Image (tube, grey):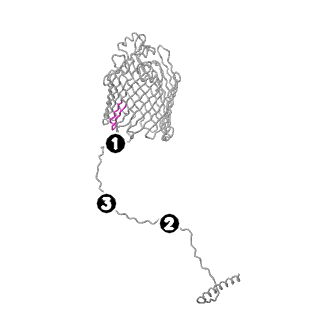
């Protein structure tokens, strides 16, 4: 190792000497004597390790300069309408009881009572009773006294998501068959027939019923909302005819976004037994089942609803019925104008109870038949003219199959004529209805409403659409003067009607057609006044048929002339 180093050192020295010798040959000569010790210098290295870097720049002071400029704003004052404040307590005091009593012409007493629980979060209950009777006082006709008694009670239970409603009622209505000339006096009737049938001169209707309903109160619209109920009515008359009607119905609906799915379910069972004097007992029983599914969609501006009515009716023979159902509307200018169009159809139950409510002077055991609203095509426009005025104009074309019409038939027992009564006949009736309604309300003190409908009829078998007016006009107004004086006005004007002259006893569909009789139109004007002496005590005066017209609502059955009834009310 040392010999190798010495050789390398010698070579370096020789090379250096040669170089210096060469330089000496050129210029000068240098001689170096000694031992050569080479050394290595320290290396300077670059440090590449990462170092933190703060990206937040130091805040720079900013200065703002304001220019002295003055803006000229002209003064403008808007007029503000005067406002009237009606300050009331959060919850006014309620009274549990309310009684109304009065007396009028023709020996007409009135008594009415309300009593309920007032406010409660858990439940509510109450009762109502009303009595109204009169001796009639109609000249040139038979005895025309009548009376009405109503007693009903209710109970409601409010649960977290449901409300349960229960009701029980009793109704008793007494009418007289006075539709015959007064020349046939009661004295002659009793001489010729000492013991007339119980329902020869009068009729008494009794109804005992109860109802139960369950309604959902879901806040979540995606849940199945439902309203289901049961109603039972046992209806009888003085002649012994009886009807038991049981109705189960439900309405279901569920929202899915902008669409709503739902439907109505109906189960209507009717058991009827009619007692006839000289004919065998009439029995008609049947169940009607209906299903009306629908789907609707809306975006707030338009609404479209499409469905159908599907019914199976087992009254007599079982029949199947299908009816189209649809509705569409469009909101214009924030509900100022809402045009709409639709079609409807359904099966309609006709029973002893419903027929006697329409015409209380019917026979004691009429033949029953259900009706069909084959279609009701309608289109209209409703809206508002300002904040206080609303309107609705409409045109419709409908067809009802087996619609009940009423013919007057003479009641002759043992050669003695008693009060005439009406026989329902069923026919297909096409009806065109052009009409409209107008409503005005201002400051909760003035309310006015009116309506006009013009009708056109066509029948299939009967010569005329008996007792149906060609137009109706109604007007109502309520004015509340400083919560002290209340004025009510109701006016009803019905146009002329075609009535059938009284048919002979024993008339049937095979007999000659009835003779048509045109009845004039009539105006019935009602005026009511109430003065509130205190919040609990008030007096009232009511006047009916102010025009004193002796018009006939049904053939040979004129109404009372002007009836004046006054009384008082008291809350406790």
Percent coordinates x, y for residue 168 in the rendering: 46, 29
Count of marks, rendered view: 3
Residue highlighted by disc 3 = 69
Percent coordinates x, y for residue 22 in the rendering: 62, 87
Residue highlighted by disc 2 = 54
**Front-most of 200 and 371?**
371
Q: In the displayed image of the protein, which residue is found farthest to the front?
A: 26
Q: Is residue 212 magenta?
A: no
Question: Which badge, 3 or 1, is on the more N-terminal residue?
Answer: 3
- Quarter occupied by the C terminus: top left
Q: Residues within 10 Å of mark 2 (few under 14, many from 20)?
A: few
Q: Is residue 437 magenta?
A: yes
Percent coordinates x, y for residue 242 in the rendering: 48, 21
- State the CA–CA distance, disc 3 to disc 2: 43 Å
Q: Is residue 487 above or below residue 57?
A: above
Left or right: where 293 falls relative to 563: right
Residue shown at 41% from the left, 28% from the top: 129
- State the CA–CA distance, disc 2 to disc 1: 66 Å
Residue highlighted by disc 1 = 87
What stretch of residues is rendered in magenta? 436-451
* Label 1 SS: loop
Q: Nearer the viewer, mark 3 or mark 2?
A: 3
Contact between labelled residues 1 and 3, with CB atoms less than 8 Å apart: no
Left or right: where 76 falls relative to 195: left
- Quarter occupied by the N terminus: bottom right
Left or right: where 56 falls relative to 72: right
Question: Which badge, 2 or 1, is on the more N-terminal residue?
Answer: 2
- State the CA–CA distance, disc 3 to disc 1: 49 Å
Question: Which badge, 3 or 2, is on the more N-terminal residue?
Answer: 2
């Amino acid at each position: 190792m040392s010999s190798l180093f010495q050789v390398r050192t010698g070579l370096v020295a020789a090379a250096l000497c040669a170089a210096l010798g060469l330089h000496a040959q050129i210029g000068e000569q240098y001689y170096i004597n000694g031992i050569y010790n080479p050394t290595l210098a320290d290396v300077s290295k670059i440090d590449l390790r990462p170092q933190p870097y703060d990206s937040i720049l130091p805040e720079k002071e900013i200065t703002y300069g304001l220019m002295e400029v003055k803006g000229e704003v002209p003064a403008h004052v808007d007029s503000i309408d005067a406002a009237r404040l009606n300050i009331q307590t959060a919850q006014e005091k309620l009274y549990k009881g309310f009684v109304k009593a009065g007396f009028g012409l023709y020996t007409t007493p009135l008594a009415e009572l309300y009593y309920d629980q007032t406010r409660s979060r858990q439940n509510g209950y109450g009762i109502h009773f009303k009595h109204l009777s009169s001796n009639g006082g109609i000249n040139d006709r038979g005895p025309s006294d009548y009376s009405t008694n109503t007693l009903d009670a209710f109970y409601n239970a409010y649960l977290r998501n449901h409300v349960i409603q229960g009701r029980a009622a009793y109704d008793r209505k007494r009418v007289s068959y006075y539709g015959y000339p007064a020349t046939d006096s009661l004295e002659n009737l009793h001489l010729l027939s000492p013991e007339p049938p119980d329902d020869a001169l009068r009729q008494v209707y009794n109804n005992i019923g109860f109802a139960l309903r369950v309604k959902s109160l879901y806040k979540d619209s995606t849940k199945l909302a439902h309203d289901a109920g049961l109603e039972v009515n046992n209806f009888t008359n003085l002649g012994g005819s009886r009807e038991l009607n049981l109705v189960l119905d439900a309405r279901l609906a569920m929202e899915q976004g902008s669409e709503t799915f739902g439907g109505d379910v109906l189960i209507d069972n009717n058991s009827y037994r009619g007692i006839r004097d000289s004919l065998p007992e009439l029995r008609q029983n049947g169940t009607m089942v209906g299903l009306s599914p629908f789907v609707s969609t809306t975006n707030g501006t338009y609404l479209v609803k499409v469905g159908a009515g599907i019914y199976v009716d087992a009254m007599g023979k079982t029949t199947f019925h299908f009816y189209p159902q649809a509705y569409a509307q469009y909101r214009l200018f924030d509900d100022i104008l809402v045009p709409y169009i639709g079609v409807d159809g359904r099966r309609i139950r006709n029973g002893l109870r419903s027929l006697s409510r329409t015409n209380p002077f019917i026979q004691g055991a009429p033949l029953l038949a259900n009706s069909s609203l084959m279609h009701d095509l309608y289109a209209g426009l409703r809206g508002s003219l300002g904040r206080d005025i609303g309107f609705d104009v409409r045109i419709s074309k409908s067809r009802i199959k087996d619609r009940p019409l009423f013919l007057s038939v003479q009641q002759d027992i043992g050669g003695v004529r008693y009060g005439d009564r009406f026989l329902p006949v069923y026919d297909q009736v096409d009806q065109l209805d052009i009409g409209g309604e107008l409503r005005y309300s201002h400051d909760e003190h003035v309310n006015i409403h009116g309506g006009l409908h013009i009708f056109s009829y066509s029948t299939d078998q009967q010569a005329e659409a008996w007792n149906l007016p060609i137009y109706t006009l109604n007007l109502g107004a309520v004015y509340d003067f400083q919560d002290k004086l209340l004025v009510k006005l109701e006016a009803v004007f019905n146009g002329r009607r075609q009535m059938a002259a009284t048919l002979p006893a024993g008339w049937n569909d095979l007999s000659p057609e009835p003779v048509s009789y045109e009845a004039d139109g009539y105006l019935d004007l009602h005026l009511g006044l109430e003065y509130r002496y205190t919040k609990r005590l008030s007096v009232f005066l009511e006047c009916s048929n102010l025009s004193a017209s002796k018009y006939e609502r049904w053939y040979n059955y004129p109404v009372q002339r002007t009836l004046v009834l006054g009384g008082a009310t008291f809350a406790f």
